[in-house]
Image (cartoon, helix red, strand yellow):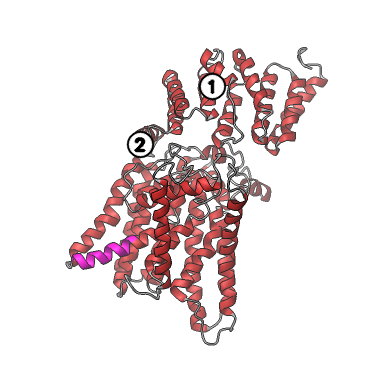
Amino acid sequence: MNALRQPAAGLLLGLLLAIAFYSYMPGAAGPFIVDDIPNILENDFLVLPELSLESLREAALSSPASRFRRPLAMLSLALDFTLAGGKSELAAKTVNILLHLICGLGVYLLTVKLLTRFHNRTLIPDINTQIRGAALLVAGMFLLHPLYVSTVLYAIQRMAILSNLFIIYGCLGYIYLRDRTLRLGAGLPGLIASGVLFTVLGFFSKENGALLPGFLLLIELFCFNFRFHPEAHPRSGLVLGAFLGIPVVVIGSYLLFIFLLHAGEPLAPYGFTPWERLLTEARVLWSYAGWLTFLNPSPMGIYHDDLTVSTGLAQPWTTMPAAVGWLIVVVLTARLSLRRHVIAFGLLWFLWGHILESTVLPLAPMFEHRNYQPGLGLFLVLVLLIRHAGVTLAPNPYLRHALCLLIFVLMPLYTLQARVADWGDRKSLTLALLRDKPYSAQSLIMAAKFLAEGGDRDNALLAARQAQLLDPDEPSHVMAEALIHCNANRSARFSTGLEDRLRGLRVTGFVSVNTLRQLRQMIPICQSSRSNEDVLLALYDHLSIHADDRLAMLGMYGSGTIHMQQRKYMEVVHDWEAAMARHPDAAGLKPALEWARRQINQGEDHPASR
C-alpha cells in the first residue's frame, strides 16, 4: 500500500471510489435477467437452510453455467442470499459493486507498481507524483467505464468480477514477491505458490482465472526480464520460465487443437465453425476496443444476437479490414515487444485477456463482460498516449489536467450514470434494449415478457411474433409466444397460427441455450392448459427423439407433465424413466416418479393409460 502513503493520491483515489459507488447504487435494485434465471432464480441451493458442509457443497456446485461449476462465485452468492434472507437483487448487486471497487483499488496499485518497473521508460512518467496521477486516471477509467455496467449490475457476472479480482491481486502479489527475489536472492517457492493459489482461486470463480500465468509472464518480460539476485540458484530463471510459460503453451495448444480438429465442422450450440468464429471475433474485438476507448459510436447492450457471423473474409465485407487490422496490430506489437515498450504490454494484455472467450471456442460471439479484465491493457495505453500528447501539445499543466479529467473521469461518468439509470428497473432496461437494439430478437423477447407480466397480452404476443420474423430459425421465440399465451389464459386454445408453428417446430442439430431455457419455463406453465394438450404432446414427442440429450430429456419431461394432468400414471412413469435415463439433470424427477408408481399400485391410473 506504499502507493497510498501520499495524502493527495489517497484522497483522490477515495473520491473516485466514492463516486463509483454512488453512481452504481441506483442500479442495484434492478432485476435478475438472462443467465441469472437458471443460475440464481431456478437454483434451490443458494439460500442455505443450515451452515453445513453438505449445504455448502450443494451451493458451490449448483451452477449450470460450466462443467467446472465456478464454486467460489456460487458460494459468494449463497452467502449474500443467506444473509439477506432470500434471493435479493439488491444484496447480490451491492456486493458486486463493492467487489468492483476492490478491483478498482487493485488496478490503481497494480498500475503504480508497473509504471515504476518498466525497463523501457518511453511514455512512462519519471516523477512519482506523475506515476500516481497516471494510475489514478487508469483506475478512474476502470471504475467509471459504462461498458462495465453490464458486468457489475448483472448479478451472475460475480463470476467475471471475482476472477478478475484474483488476477489483479495475483499480479500485485507477484510483483511484491518478485522484488524480494531480486533483493534477497530467495523466495522463489513462495512466489510460485502465490501464483498457483491465485490462479486456482481465479479459475474456480471463472475459467478465465487460468490466464493469470500469462499475465504474470508479461509482467516478468517487461518489468523483470528474468533477472535474479547474484546469489540466487542458477536455475531460478529456468524454473520460473517453466512455471509461467507452460500454462501459456497448454492454453495455446488446446485452442490450436480445437481449431485443427474441428476446422470445417459446425460446433454446437451456435452452428459456426472455429474458422467462422475466429473471423467473426476479428470484427467483435474491434467493437470492444472501440467501446473501451470511446471510439465506437454503436450502442452497448446485453444482447448482440443481431451480429452477423462472418462466413468468409468477404462476408460480410468488414471481415477483411478487421482481420488485416489485427494483423497489423500483431506485427506492430511484436516489434514493440522487442523494445519492451509499454504499448506492446497493453496490447498484449488486451489480446491475452480475450484468448479464451474471443477465439475458437464455441461460445456466443459477443458479450460485454468479456472486457472486464482485458480492458486494463487498453486503459493503460490510452492514458499514457493522451498524457504524452498533452505534454507535447498543451504546455500549460492546468490545461493538461483539465483535459485528462474530462476524458478519463467526467466523460465516462456521464455515460455511466445514464446507463445505470437504464438498469434501475425492468421497465427502463426493457425500453433501453428496444431503443439501442431494435433488430435484436432477444431484446424483443425480453420486452414481450415484461409486457406479459404487466398484463398487456396482445402487445406481448406482437413482440414475440416480431422476434420470430427477425430470427425465424430460433425455436425459443415460438415457445415464448406459447408461454405468454399459457400465462394469460391456460383454458384458452392456442391460435391457429401458433398451433401450426408449434406442430411444425423443427430444432436443428444445434440446440441453443435459449431454446433449452424457454422450454424449461414453458413446460410447467403450460402443463395444465387442457385445451392445448394435443398440440403440446405432439411438440414434446417430436423433441424427445432429438439427438441432443438435454432437449430430448426435456421433451420426455414435458410429455410426463401432460400425462400427469391426465392421470395417465403409466405414461408418466414411462416418460420420466426415459428422461432420467437420457440425462442426469432429470434426477430431480425421482420423488414425483415414485409418487406416480404408488398411484398405479393403488389402482388410480386412468384407464386410457398403457
The answer to whether residue 96 is above or below residue 306 is: below
- Determine the CA span between mark 2 and mark 1: 27 Å
The outermost residue toward the right is 601
Q: Which element is circle 2 on?
A: helix
Query: Does the magenta portion include 388?
Result: yes
Q: In the rendered structure, which disc, 2 or 1, sits on the residue that comes first in sequence?
A: 2
Q: Residue at x 51, y 68 (%)?
A: 217
For disc 1, the marked residue is 482
The outermost residue toward the front is 314
Mark 1: amino acid = Ala
The answer to whether residue 13 shows anywhere in this view is: no
The answer to whether residue 166 shows anywhere in this view is: yes
Q: Residues within 10 Å of mark 2 (few under 14, many from 20)?
A: some
Q: Is the residue under label 1 in contact with that under label 2 (CB below 8 Å)?
A: no
For disc 2, the marked residue is 436
Say which of 365 and 335 sits in front: 335
Q: Quadrant of the N terminus?
A: bottom left
**Direction from residue 392 to residue 456 in the image, left or right:** right
In x, y percent, where is residue 68? Answer: 62, 50
Say which of 604 and 464 sits in front: 464
Instruction: Write the start and end of the magenta stretch as one range.
Output: 382-394
Q: Quadrant of residue 387?
A: bottom left
In x, y percent, where is residue 497? Answer: 51, 15
In x, y percent, where is residue 141? Answer: 34, 56
Say which of 533 and 152 sits in front: 533
The answer to whether residue 463 is above or below residue 420 is: above
